Image: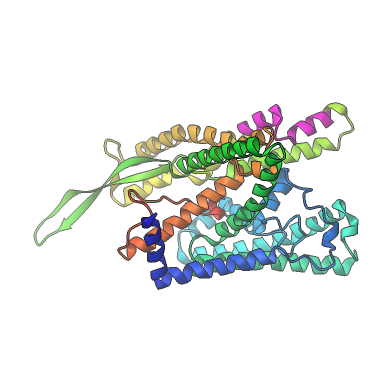
Amino acid sequence: MKKFIDTLKNIWSIDELRNRIIFTLTLLLVYRVGCHVVLPGINPNELNDGSSQNGLLGLFNMFAGGAFNKASIFALGIMPYISASIAMQLAQIAIPQLQKMSKEESGRKKITLITRYVTVAVTLFQAIGYIAYLRSQNGNAIIMDNFGWMLSTVIVLTTGTLFVMWLGEKITDKGIGNGTSLVITAGIIARLPHSLVQEVTSKFAKGAASGLLLFLIELAVMILIIMAIIMLVQGTRRIPLNYARRIVGASSVKDISGNRDFIPIKVNSAGVMPIIFAQAMLFIPSTLVGFAQNDTAQGLAKSLSNPGSLWYNVIYAILVIAFTYLYTALIFNPTQMADDLKRNNGFIPGIKPGDDTANYIGAIMDRITLPGAIFLAALGILPGLAGQMDITSGFASFFGGTSMLIMVGVVLDTLQQIESQLLMRHYDGLMKTGRITGRQPVTASV
């Protein structure tokens, strides 16, 4: 405890770090306040706040920090920017010109600008869809439904998303941590107190003693899940690596073995993207089948939309594993990595440079992706299983799944940056041994 207090004092004593943390918390507070500002022309008392807890709409609501169900000016949140970033990331893989641009500073600036334009286009499209969603939920919530209201709502929603995007960029530039990731995490954490109150109320309704015991067991299980997620996020396979150095003397040039290094291959390189893709894929067929006037089709739609059903969990797990391999193959290029090593005089001991190195790295990546994908699939279905064990839906979402994966990953990334600031100024880090390992930002891996 004393070391923790001393660490907090060290953090507060560093002017730059203190200012960055205060700046970050201030902008996050602005975002959370904006999440409670209702759109003009909407009666908040007529809104159905719990109408979209599952499926793709529940995912939107989570990324928006609950603003989606509240018809807030930030209802679309940062999701359009994430969608545009993912689209541009995939486009860089498919389009050689964009891939070439991403390797230059000026090219990366152009890609960032294109991403912002794509964000505007995606937001306009989603804003129109959101208006249709509000009409379908409760027409009484819209005070005056006319073209003027539609136009103003589209403008406000688009402006709100761009403002949230600007907040995230400012946090990244002048704050601490990845701004986009922290905006999403702030929304997820904001849901935790209400979910805790609901769970405690539900458990104590069955009796004070038994309810307290069950709640403590649930907290213990949640802590174990968090520890497992930390292992998944930080888990790496280190491939030994050597660099050949050249010493230029007055009359001779000779090669000597350089310092030993490693290539860290993450067990879960795909991040949370496979879970998001799997949820979206399950939402689409269940929606299409739901329109069919057939009892069998209706039963299938109900099964695919119920996180507690056997078919939902089996198909969901298979999709997560498949998308883990697919997304890893898209973002991980062993051939390019082998070429980069060859250009920098790097080599893996016992492996020839070039194609042999690429095949070796690819084989290792394939081997460690399987356990990572299975682990990720298990974490993805845990919230659905928790919901079947008499745990409230809000609290069950923190037993793994998208919410907990993002939250744990972002917290680790932010702590890593704080620790780097401390070590750079010759203070002790946040841990007695080892270093905190971060992860990719949400815009890349979500």
Q: Residue at x 73, y 56 (%)?
A: 68
Residue 93 in sight:
no
Q: Is residue 340 magenta?
A: no
Prevailing secondary structure of the magenta residues:
helix
The answer to which of 110 and 83 lies nearer the viewer is: 83
Percent across and percent down for residue 83 are 64, 54
Residue 183 in sight:
yes
Q: Residue furthest left?
A: 251
The span picked out in magenta is 297-318
Horizontal side, residue 15 vs residue 136: left or right: left
Horizontal side, residue 140 vs residue 3: left or right: right
The answer to which of 307 and 311 lies nearer the viewer is: 307
**Quarter residue 141 falls in:** bottom right
**Quarter residue 138 falls in:** bottom right
Q: Residue at x 76, y 68 (%)?
A: 155
Q: How many marks?
A: 0
Q: Quadrant of the N terminus?
A: bottom left
Q: Is residue 310 magenta?
A: yes
Percent across and percent down for residue 159 are 70, 68
Image: 382 above or below 121:
above
Horizontal side, residue 170 vs residue 83: left or right: left
Percent across and percent down for residue 167 are 59, 67
Q: Residue at x 56, y 64 (%)?
A: 112
Percent across and percent down for residue 334 are 42, 42
Horizontal side, residue 118 vs residue 227: left or right: right
Q: Residue at x 38, y 63 (%)?
A: 421
**Quarter residue 305 falls in:** top right
Identify the coloring.
rainbow
